């Protein structure tokens, strides 16, 4: 078989491989609107009608594109672009015809994930005065507090460390949206070279807690300059 005959076969194989990749892509870490339960339950109930997306007055929700494989057409959030504003009346939940989104009466009922602060890039953790995440949090004082403490390895200077309380943070992402660290829009890095925001939402709470613990262990192993 000549090269001409091989080209369609190779192209077909590539398309098939891409199809398999997207069909089997793990969607468990996609950030879902308030009232979504486990990813499996959500995916089985959501009929991709888009009503929640239309109902969101802040345009926080959008439909997943085909890069998200089987989740295409389902509602997701990108907290860095637009977080959930935790509307008092939860229009997204109330319009859902299938109970894919359900069970939310008050803000404290929401569980979209857990915020995790990157202590290596967070300005407050590094000793600068930044309280953005604390100031914008709709549950400040419970979900997030500022902990005045001496900077590690420094017996003089106090930092105001943002501490997330895992039992109260609802994962709305407002802290992520407003954090001054990290790129925005089409940027790949900010002016200081940071390629990521200093706080992120992890949907799987156990994974988020594990990440926080690992960071604490690493921090204790590596003294700050
Ligand atoms: S609670 Fe409000 S801001 Fe959040 S996703 Fe629902 S409609 Fe949008
Ligand atoms: S309203 Fe409910 S069923 Fe419709 S797209 Fe949103 S989550 Fe899915
Ligand atoms: S995600 Fe951030 S802003 Fe939202 S409740 Fe948690 S700490 Fe507060």
Image (cartoon, rainbow, N blue to C red):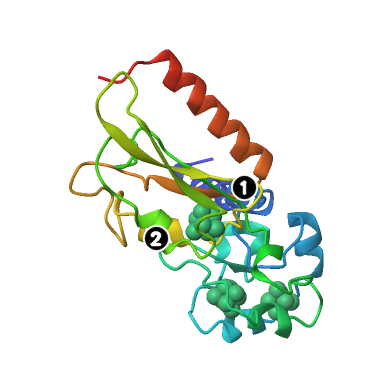
Q: Residues within 10 Å of mark 2 (few under 14, many from 20)?
A: some
Q: Locate residue 100, reporting x and y percent.
A: 77, 70
Determine whether, in the image, residue 201 is placed left or right of residue 127: right
Quarter for ligand 1? bottom right
Mark 2 vs mark 1, CA separation in Å: 41 Å
* Residue 190 seen: yes
Q: Residues within 10 Å of mark 1 (few under 14, many from 20)?
A: some
Residue visible at 18% across and 48% down?
191
Front residue of this view, candidates 77 and 84: 84
* Residue 48 seen: no
**Position of the C terminus by quadrant:** top left
Residue visible at 63% across and 38% down?
207
Front residue of this view, candidates 40 and 66: 40
Q: Locate residue 91, reporting x and y percent.
A: 64, 83
Query: Helix or strand or loop: what does disc 2 sit on?
Result: helix
Q: Give the residue at mark 1.
A: 21
- The mark that comes first in sequence, 2 or 1, is 1
Q: Locate residue 162, reporting x and y percent.
A: 43, 44
Front residue of this view, candidates 127 and 215: 127
Q: Quadrant of residue 3?
A: top left
Q: Give the residue at mark 2.
A: 135
**Position of the N terminus by quadrant:** top right
Residue 179, disc: none
Ligand 2 under 8 Å from disc 1 Cβ: no
Q: Identify whether 28 is placed above or below 87.
A: above
Residue visible at 54% across and 25% down?
214
Q: Locate residue 94, reporting x and y percent.
A: 72, 83
Most extreme residue toward the left is: 191
Q: Identify whether 20 is placed above or below 97.
A: above
Q: Identify whether 193 is placed above or below 216.
A: below
Determine whether, in the image, residue 158 is placed left or right of residue 216: left
């Amino acid at each position: 078989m000549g090269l001409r005959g091989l080209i369609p076969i190779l192209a077909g194989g590539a398309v098939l491989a891409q199809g398999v990749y997207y069909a089997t892509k793990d969607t468990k870490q996609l950030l879902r609107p308030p009232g979504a339960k486990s990813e499996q339950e959500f995916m089985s109930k959501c009929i991709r009608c888009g009503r929640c997306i239309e109902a969101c007055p802040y345009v926080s929700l959008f439909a997943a594109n085909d890069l998200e494989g089987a989740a295409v057409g389902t509602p997701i959030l990108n907290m860095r672009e637009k977080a959930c504003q935790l509307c008092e009346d939860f229009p997204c939940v109330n319009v859902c015809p299938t109970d894919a989104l359900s069970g939310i009466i008050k803000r404290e009922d929401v569980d979209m994930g857990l915020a995790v602060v990157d202590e290596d890039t967070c300005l407050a953790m590094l000793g600068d005065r930044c309280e953005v995440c604390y100031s914008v949090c709709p549950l400040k004082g419970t979900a997030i507090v500022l902990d005045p403490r001496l900077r590690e390895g420094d017996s003089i200077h106090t930092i105001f460390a943002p501490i997330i309380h895992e039992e109260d943070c609802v994962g709305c992402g407002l802290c992520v949206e407003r954090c001054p660290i990290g790129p925005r829009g089409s940027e790949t890095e900010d002016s200081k070279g940071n390629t990521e925001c200093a706080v992120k939402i992890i949907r799987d709470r156990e994974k988020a807690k594990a990440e926080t613990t690992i960071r604490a262990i690493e921090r204790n192993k590596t003294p700050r300059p």
